Image (tube, rainbow, N blue to C red):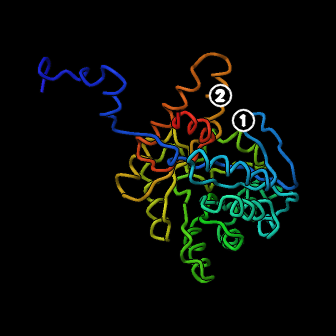
């Protein structure tokens, strides 16, 4: 159809008409709120590069989870900040580590909430890498053994889902097998399937204390120029037992989100990462953008690209707007 018979502006004349024909709709149920959990009680350490977010002791993380639940946010994902770090990240397996304690606190305070845990060693190793170092690089297969035990520890503490983010080859299969063998075949895996070696992670590394002590993560995280490789990574994880596949970061990789959704049909999550959050907050503070509107447009773009779940530090702020 052509003008003047077809006039697209007819359906844009007012907010009600625009809402009636909207192809993508955001809701609080789309969001997963990341929480940083640290040892202690009554601890609430501000994260300077991520205004509005804190390192929280387990009981305060549980209170924050309850607040999120009351806004309609169905899930949180937990990142741990241990009291002690070593070469092999042994504190990740401690049943009394911050994440394990926070799981129990959250499930007591808001049992209906889905508690997801990040399974990776970067926060727990003294060198800041995501696995066991051998010969100056992360050794894939020995790391798998620790990741298996870490996931099992989280599930035993009561989490509802595990999310391996390390990008080791074979880690989904390794975790799936240990969970199944342990009687936890009902626990789903959300795999960071296409996690890129991105410059957008800076504020997170401050929050989690996970900056690499040497080198970088390019030998295990994905190379930004590659799109076909992302599909191969995703398909591998699906074959190994992933229930949800994630693309991280979100904004520079909207094309990957779309490809993954269209070519797999699987549930797709996307991580609206710390750098994306902090850039919007910083520009808004300077008065260069309308932070609220840019936030909502950003989240809408991620969902429109194909993500059914969005891990975002904007979760609470956006949910309040959507709830009116």
Q: Nearer the viewer, residue 138 or 12?
A: 12
Q: Nearer the viewer, residue 201 or 298?
A: 298
Numbered disc in front, either 2 or 1? 1
Q: Position of residue 174 (x, y in %)?
A: 59, 74
Q: Label 1 near label 2: C-beta < 8 Å?
A: yes
Q: Where 289 falls versus 182 (above or below)?
A: above
Q: Which residue is mark 1?
A: 52
Label 1 Cα neighbours within 10 Å, binned few <14 / some 14-19 / many ≥20: few
Q: Is 310 on the left or on the right of 25, as rendered?
A: right
Give the Cα distance between marks 2 and 1: 10 Å
Q: Residue at x 73, y 54 (%)?
A: 62
Q: Position of residue 192 (x, y in %)?
A: 56, 56
Q: Quadrant of residue 319?
A: top right
Q: Where 2 falls versus 165 (above or below)?
A: above
Disc 2 or 1, which lies upstream in sequence?
Answer: 1
Find numbered disc 1 in the image and state the secondary structure of the residue it sits on.
loop
Residue 148 seen in this snapshot: yes
Q: Where 146 falls versus 305 (above or below)?
A: below
Find numbered disc 2 in the image and state the secondary structure of the residue it sits on.
helix
Q: Position of residue 140 (x, y in %)?
A: 65, 67
Q: Residue at x 26, y 25 (%)?
A: 11
Q: Is 22 on the left or on the right of 5, as rendered?
A: right
- Give the quadrant of the N terminus: top left
Q: Residue at x 49, y 70 (%)?
A: 241
The tag on residue 126 is none
Q: Position of residue 129 (x, y in %)?
A: 73, 55
Q: Nearer the viewer, residue 243 or 158?
A: 158
Residue 214 seen in this snapshot: no
Q: Residue at x 71, y 63 (%)?
A: 108
Q: Which residue is mark 2?
A: 281
């Amino acid at each position: 159809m052509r003008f003047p018979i077809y006039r697209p502006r007819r359906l844009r004349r007012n907010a009600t008409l625009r809402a009636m024909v909207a192809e993508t709709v955001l809701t609080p149920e789309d969001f997963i709120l990341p929480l940083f959990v640290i040892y202690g009680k009554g601890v609430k350490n501000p994260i300077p590069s991520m205004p509005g977010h804190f390192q929280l002791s387990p009981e305060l993380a549980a209170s924050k989870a309850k607040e999120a639940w009351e806004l309609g946010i169905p899930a949180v994902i937990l990142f741990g900040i241990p009291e002690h770090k070593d070469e092999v990240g042994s504190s990740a397996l401690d049943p009394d580590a911050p994440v394990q304690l926070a799981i129990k606190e959250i499930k007591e305070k808001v049992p209906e909430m889905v508690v997801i845990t990040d399974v990776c060693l970067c926060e727990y190793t003294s060198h800041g890498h995501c696995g066991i170092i051998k010969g100056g690089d992360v050794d894939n297969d020995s790391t798998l053994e620790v990741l298996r035990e870490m996931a099992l520890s989280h599930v035993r503490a009561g989490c509802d889902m595990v999310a391996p983010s390390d990008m080791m080859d074979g880690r989904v299969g390794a975790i799936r097998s240990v969970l199944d063998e342990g009687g936890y075949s009902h626990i789903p895996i959300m795999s960071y399937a296409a996690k890129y070696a991105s410059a957008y992670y800076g504020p997170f590394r401050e929050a989690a204390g996970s900056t690499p002590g040497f080198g970088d993560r390019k030998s295990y995280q994905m190379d930004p120029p590659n799109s076909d490789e992302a599909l191969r990574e995703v398909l591998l994880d699906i074959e190994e037992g992933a229930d949800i596949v994630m693309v991280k970061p979100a904004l520079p990789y909207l094309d990957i989100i779309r490809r993954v959704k269209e070519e797999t049909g699987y549930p797709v999550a996307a991580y609206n990462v710390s750098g994306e959050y902090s850039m919007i907050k910083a520009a808004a503070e300077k008065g260069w953008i309308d932070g609220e509107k840019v936030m909502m447009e950003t989240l809408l773009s991620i969902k429109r690209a194909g993500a059914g779940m969005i891990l975002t530090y904007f979760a609470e702020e956006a949910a309040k707007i959507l709830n009116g």
